[in-house]
Image (cartoon, rainbow, N blue to C red):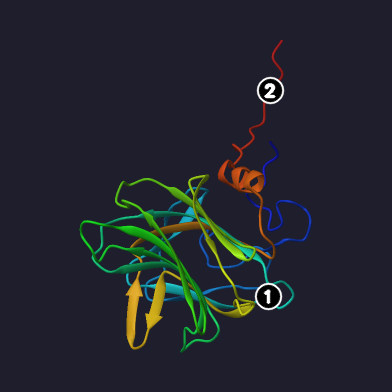
C-alpha cells in the first residue's frame, strides 16, 4: 500500500481539505487552516511522528468549507486518565460563543460506571447523539472516523460502531474548530491526552477508505547502502 501519511488529499480526488500532524507545530499540512495554541504548547510521541499533548490546553483555528454538506473527520487519540468530566477531542462550531450549530466529539466519563465516546451534532433545533461504550485509559492509540451523509456513521478502530439517521440540511459548513476543548456556556471542558493525524474531508468516506486510513503507516527512513561484493 502506498504511503499516504503526509498527503492532505490521500485519495487524490480533492476530498482531503485539511491535515494536522502536530509534528512540532499546529499547522495544517495544506497551509490553509493553521492552528493556534492556548495554554502550554506540548508534543509527545505520536501515532506518526509527534502528537499534540493536551492538559488544560487547546488549539483553535477557523475552518471554512462552504461547498459541501457532507463531511468526514478522522484522527488518532490516546487518553491519559479516566477523567470525571467531558474530555473534548474535537469541537467544530458556527462561531466562537454559541454551539447551536456544531459537531463535537467527547469522552464522557461523568458516570463512573458507564463511560462513553460521544459524537454529537446540533443544527440549532435538534441534537443527534452517537454514544459508544468506551474505556479510555488503556494507554493505547485509538482511531476514530466520523462520517456524515444524511446519516451519522461512527467508526472506532476500523469497526462501524453506530449509525444514526439525521434529518436536517443545517449541518455546520464552516466556523470555529477546536482541538482539546469544548466551551459550554461559561464552562470549559478539556481533553487530557494526545491527538494525532487529524484529517477533514469534504465528502463521506467509504468503509474501504476508512480501512485505508486506519492502516496508514509511516515509512522507515531510508539509509544509504554500500555495494557488497
Residue at image coords 72%, 71%: 68
Residue 10 visible? The answer is yes
- Tell me: residue 88, above or below residue 74: below
Residue 29: which quarter of the image? bottom right
x and y, in percent, of residue 213 in the image: 60, 47
* Most distant residue in the left direction: 112
Residue 198 can be seen in this image: no
The x, y position of residue 149, in whole percent, is 64, 63
Q: Is mark 2 on a helix, strand or loop?
A: loop
Could you say which disc has been placed on residue 115 in the image?
none
Q: Nearer the viewer, residue 190 or 163?
A: 163
Q: Image point 23% across, 65% down: which residue? A: 84
- Please name whichever residue, 117 or 7, is drawn nearer the observer in this view of the structure: 117
User: Could you say whether the residue bearing mark 1 is in a helix, strand or loop?
Assistant: loop
Residue of label 1:
65
| First in residue order: circle 1 vs circle 2 | 1
Residue 153 falls in image quadrant: bottom right
Q: Which residue lies furthest to the top in this view?
A: 229
Spot occupied by residue 223 in the image (x, y as percentages of width and height): 63, 33
Q: How far apart are marks 1 and 2 (CA)?
A: 50 Å
Crowd tier of the residue under label 2, counting other residues whose Cα lies within 10 Å: few below 14, some 14–19, many 20 or above: few
Give neighbour class at mark 1: few <14, some 14-19, many 20+ (Cα, 10 Å): some
Q: Position of residue 197 (x, y in %)?
A: 55, 56
3 lies left or right of 156: right
The disc at residue 226 is 2
Q: Residue sitting at 70 percent across and 52 percent down?
A: 10
Residue at point 58%, 41% (across, down): 215
Amino acid at each position: 500500500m502506498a504511503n499516504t501519511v503526509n498527503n492532505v488529499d490521500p485519495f487524490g480526488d480533492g476530498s482531503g481539505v485539511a491535515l494536522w500532524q502536530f509534528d512540532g507545530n499546529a499547522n495544517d499540512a495544506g497551509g490553509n487552516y493553521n492552528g493556534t495554541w492556548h495554554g502550554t504548547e506540548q508534543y509527545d510521541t505520536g501515532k506518526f511522528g509527534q502528537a499534540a499533548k493536551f492538559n488544560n490546553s487547546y488549539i483553535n483555528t477557523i475552518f471554512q468549507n462552504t461547498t459541501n454538506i457532507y463531511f468526514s473527520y478522522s484522527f488518532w487519540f490516546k487518553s491519559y486518565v479516566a477523567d470525571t468530566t467531558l474530555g473534548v477531542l474535537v469541537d467544530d462550531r458556527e462561531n466562537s460563543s454559541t454551539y447551536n450549530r456544531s459537531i463535537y466529539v467527547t469522552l464522557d466519563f461523568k458516570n463512573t460506571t458507564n463511560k462513553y465516546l460521544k459524537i454529537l451534532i446540533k443544527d440549532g433545533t435538534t441534537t443527534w447523539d452517537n454514544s459508544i461504550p468506551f474505556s479510555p485509559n488503556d494507554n493505547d492509540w485509538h482511531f476514530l472516523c466520523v462520517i456524515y451523509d444524511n446519516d451519522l456513521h461512527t467508526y472506532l478502530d476500523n469497526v462501524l460502531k453506530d449509525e444514526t439517521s439525521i434529518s436536517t440540511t443545517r449541518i455546520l459548513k464552516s466556523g470555529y474548530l477546536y482541538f482539546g476543548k469544548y466551551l459550554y456556556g461559561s464552562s470549559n471542558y478539556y481533553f487530557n491526552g494526545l491527538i494525532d493525524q487529524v484529517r477533514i474531508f469534504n465528502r463521506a468516506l467509504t468503509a474501504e477508505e476508512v480501512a485505508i486510513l486506519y492502516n496508514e503507516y509511516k515509512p522507515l527512513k531510508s539509509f544509504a547502502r554500500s555495494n557488497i561484493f
